[in-house]
Image: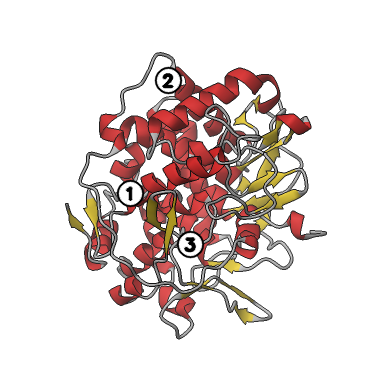
């Protein structure tokens, strides 16, 4: 790595996004309306579009992974013809999304079943028995073939959690004793109390030469998966009180009020790609409804810049841009906003605000598809007014897109992932109850 722009997406996100000041744990009113996934009715062409989006994103996770280790590249060019990108930096977060994408690919018969099962077995066996780990946690970025740590990267609590979500998804989906055994061992090996480092909230990571990072997962963002995975652990659990230890600041914007840190839109999407928060709440809110509100507020924020955005062109989340990589979005304004659009922002919210998100995604492909859509679907970001189209796709951004597209259509990821009994236990321990 030569500069900040060479860091992995989630590393950069963690470094660049603003850490919200500790806020009051405000009790928000919770809507009892049916979730959008229950009421959505596809328009002509919607299903075909979503099928294209999912099929091509799943192809990324198949082609841009090692058949020796199962690791998935952090990023790849979108104009390849089936060859693997020569870059070698793999992402454990992308691998977690990839394991889940392989479940979707098997369900929809995008790829041969036997080959998928073999790839999943290989991935889990390598991560259990050959991939370097410390207390069950993994380094964020490694060499795709050797597993060697990329110099300077952290042992990551959030990225390990993203990998574990994919591991547990595979365990619940595949009727394969070896997959189930390997996945169980990977999850149960994680020493969650160690990552607390004597505190009430999780450290963001650990360096072998410097120890634990000072930064902690202490305000609402994508952190929910870390706490629920840890609370539900049958071998090394943390106290359910950790669910109360992080703050829940509230944003008020143009009539919208919702729990959020000063962070990009992806923070409202990642945990909810796997954990099913529909029609349930804890003592603070219904987090699914909260993400619906956050997405609507984000669209309104984009449309408040009419020189840049409109109904057929909106959505910003941490992504590439002409200057490299940044964490940006709003409300409130975050980062060097310039009119770039990031397709995974609406794609990752498909299950929250289906009509608006499908509409803008279809409009963008219809208008800019020749420049902005390639072998793996949308490029990571583009800015037509500046004649800039990112040559790359990012694994985590393709991942959130395909998972939420499938959740909208069938609820498949939610339904399968929540079959893991530890996840239902964790939500119960954290105080969730049906509405």
Horizontally, residue 84 falls left or right of residue 26, namely: right
Determine crowd level at label 2: few under 14, some 14-19, many 20+ residues with C-alpha closer than 10 A. Answer: some
**Foreground label between 3 and 1:** 3
Measured as percent of width and height from the top left, residue 328 is found at: 62, 52
Which of these two is toward me, 282 or 88?
Answer: 282
- Quadrant where the image shows the N terminus: bottom right
Distance from the alpha carbon under mark 3 to that under mark 2:
32 Å
Horizontally, residue 164 falls left or right of residue 429, namely: right
Distance from the alpha carbon under mark 3 to that under mark 1:
16 Å
**Residue indicated by mark 2:** 46
**Foreground label between 3 and 2:** 3
**Residue indicated by mark 1:** 288
Measured as percent of width and height from the top left, residue 83 is found at: 71, 31
**Looking at the image, what colour scheme do you see?**
secondary structure
Relative vertical location of residue 273 with respect to residue 237 in this rendering, above or below = above
Measured as percent of width and height from the top left, residue 7 is found at: 71, 57
The residue at 35%/30% (across/down) is: 409
**Residue indicated by mark 3:** 261
The tag earlier along the polypeptide, 3 or 1, is: 3
The residue at 40%/55% (across/down) is: 183
- Asked which quadrant contains residue 198, the reply is bottom left
Decide: marks 3, 1 in contact (CB < 8 A)? no
Horizontally, residue 130 falls left or right of residue 202, namely: right
Relative vertical location of residue 252 with respect to residue 358 in this rendering, above or below = below
The residue at 53%/58% (across/down) is: 263
* Residue 19 showing in the rendered view: yes
Distance from the alpha carbon under mark 2 to that under mark 1:
23 Å
Determine crowd level at label 1: few under 14, some 14-19, many 20+ residues with C-alpha closer than 10 A. Answer: many
Q: Which mark is residue 69?
A: none
């Amino acid at each position: 790595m030569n500069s900040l722009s060479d860091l992995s997406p989630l590393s950069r996100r963690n470094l660049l996004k603003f850490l919200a000041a500790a806020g009051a744990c405000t009790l928000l009113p919770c809507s009892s309306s049916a979730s959008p996934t229950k009421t959505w009715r596809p328009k002509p062409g919607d299903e075909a579009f979503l099928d294209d989006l999912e099929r091509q994103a799943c192809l990324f996770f198949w082609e841009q992974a090692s058949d020796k280790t199962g690791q998935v590249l952090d990023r790849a060019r979108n104009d390849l013809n089936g060859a693997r990108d020569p870059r070698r930096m793999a992402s454990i977060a992308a691998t977690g999304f990839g394991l889940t994408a392989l479940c979707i690919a098997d369900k929809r018969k995008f790829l041969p079943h036997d080959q998928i099962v073999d790839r999943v077995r290989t991935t889990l066996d390598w991560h259990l028995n050959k991939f370097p780990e410390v207390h069950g946690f993994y380094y964020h970025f490694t060499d795709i073939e050797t597993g060697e740590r990329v110099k300077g990267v952290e042992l990551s609590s959030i990225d390990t959690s993203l990998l574990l979500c994919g591991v547990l998804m595979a365990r619940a989906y595949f009727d394969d004793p070896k997959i189930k055994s390997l996945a169980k061992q990977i999850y149960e090996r994680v020493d969650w109390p160690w990552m607390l480092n004597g505190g009430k909230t999780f450290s963001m990571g650990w360096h072998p030469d410097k120890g634990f990072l000072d930064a902690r997962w202490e305000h609402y963002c994508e952190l929910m998966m870390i706490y629920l995975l840890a609370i539900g652990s049958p071998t090394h659990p943390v106290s359910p009180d950790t669910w109360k230890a992080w703050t829940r600041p509230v944003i008020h914007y143009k009539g919208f009020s919702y729990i959020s840190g000063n962070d990009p839109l992806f923070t409202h999407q990642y945990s909810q790609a796997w954990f099913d928060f529909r029609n349930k709440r804890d003592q603070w809110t219904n987090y699914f409804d909260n993400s619906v509100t956050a997405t609507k507020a984000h669209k309104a924020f984009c449309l408040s810049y009419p020189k840049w955005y409109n109904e057929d062109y909106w959505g910003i989340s941490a992504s590439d841009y002409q200057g490299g990589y940044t964490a940006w979005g709003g409300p409130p304004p975050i980062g060097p906003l310039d009119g770039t659009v990031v397709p995974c922002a609406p794609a990752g919210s498909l299950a929250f605000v289906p009509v608006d998100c499908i509409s803008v995604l279809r409009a963008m492909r219809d208008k800019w598809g020749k420049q902005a859509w390639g072998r793996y679907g949308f490029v990571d970001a583009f800015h037509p007014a500046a004649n800039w189209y990112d040559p790359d796709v990012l694994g985590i951004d393709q991942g959130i897109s395909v998972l939420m597209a499938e959740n909208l259509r069938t609820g498949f990821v939610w339904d399968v992932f929540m079959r893991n009994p530890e996840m239902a236990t964790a939500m119960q321990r954290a105080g969730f109850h049906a509405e």
